[in-house]
Amino acid sequence: MTTTTSAAATTVAATVTPFDLSTGLSAAREPLRRTLSAMTSMYADAQAAQDWIEREDVLVYEFYDMGVPQTSGDVAYGTSIVYPGKVGDEYFMTKGHFHTVLDTGEIYFCLSGEGYMLMENPEGDVQWAQFVPGQAVYVPRRYAHRSINTSSSEPLITFFGFPGHAGHDYGTIEQKGFRKLCIDVEGRPTFVDNPKWAG
């Protein structure tokens, strides 16, 4: 017995997305933006964050989700732009997240800037890897991840890709935080224990 599938059921349109390689921005979609007021509780020095917000609710980072179908056979992708700055001694960073489907990884390619990817799994293993232009960082499955910009003047711009069905679990990090922080110690990025981590 022979079965046939119509072209309409199997054909997916290719997607072409323009990105500016110097800024990471794309005219194809509106970015999702995170200002400091959306992240106050994530910084160790919440008072320093609040003081800054009272002066200006500065943009910490933005990213582009290109709207790829959320299926295991597709690859979601986009760019992330983390701006330079510090809250107290702690560098600007993304919120960070696990994937809802925990056993899915992600790849980040650094286009420009400098910084780190902070990663940890539910069992307590913590790793970090440096971002430098032209270098990719692979985030293993089961690891929450957060991008950190350690430059005093340049945005950290990365291109990312992950399985379309992976999803995002921001809630666990919002409640517990990461086990480590990245802070400026005498001009050098240094990873230290997070006093606010709720294990």
Image (cartoon, rainbow, N blue to C red):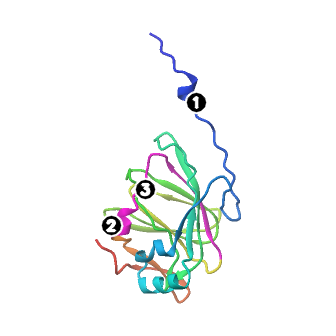
Rendered location of residue 187, percent (x, y): 56, 87
Q: N-terminal of the two: label 2 or label 3?
A: 2
Question: How far apart are the alpha carbons under marks 2 and 3?
Answer: 19 Å
Mark 1 and mark 3 in contact (Cβ < 8 Å)? no
Q: Secondary structure at mark 2?
A: loop
Q: Residue at x 54, y 21 (%)?
A: 6
Q: Which residue is mark 2?
A: 124
Going by the image, does 31 lie left or right of 165? right
Residue 61 seen anywhere in this rendered image of the structure: yes
Nearer-the-camera pick, 116 or 54: 54
Checking the image for residue 168, the label placed there is 3
Dot 3 crowding, Cα within 10 Å, few <14, some 14–19, many 20+: some
Could you tell me the amino acid type at mark 1?
Thr
Nearer-the-camera pick, 13 or 132: 13
Could you tell me the amino acid type at mark 3?
His
Which contiguous range is marked in magenta?
Answer: 154-175
Please tell me whether mark 2 or mark 3 is closer to you in this view: 3
Residue 45 seen anywhere in this rendered image of the structure: no
Mark 1 and mark 2 in contact (Cβ < 8 Å)? no
Position of the C terminus, as image quadrant, is bottom left
Quadrant in the rendering for residue 99: bottom left
Q: N-terminal of the two: label 3 or label 1?
A: 1
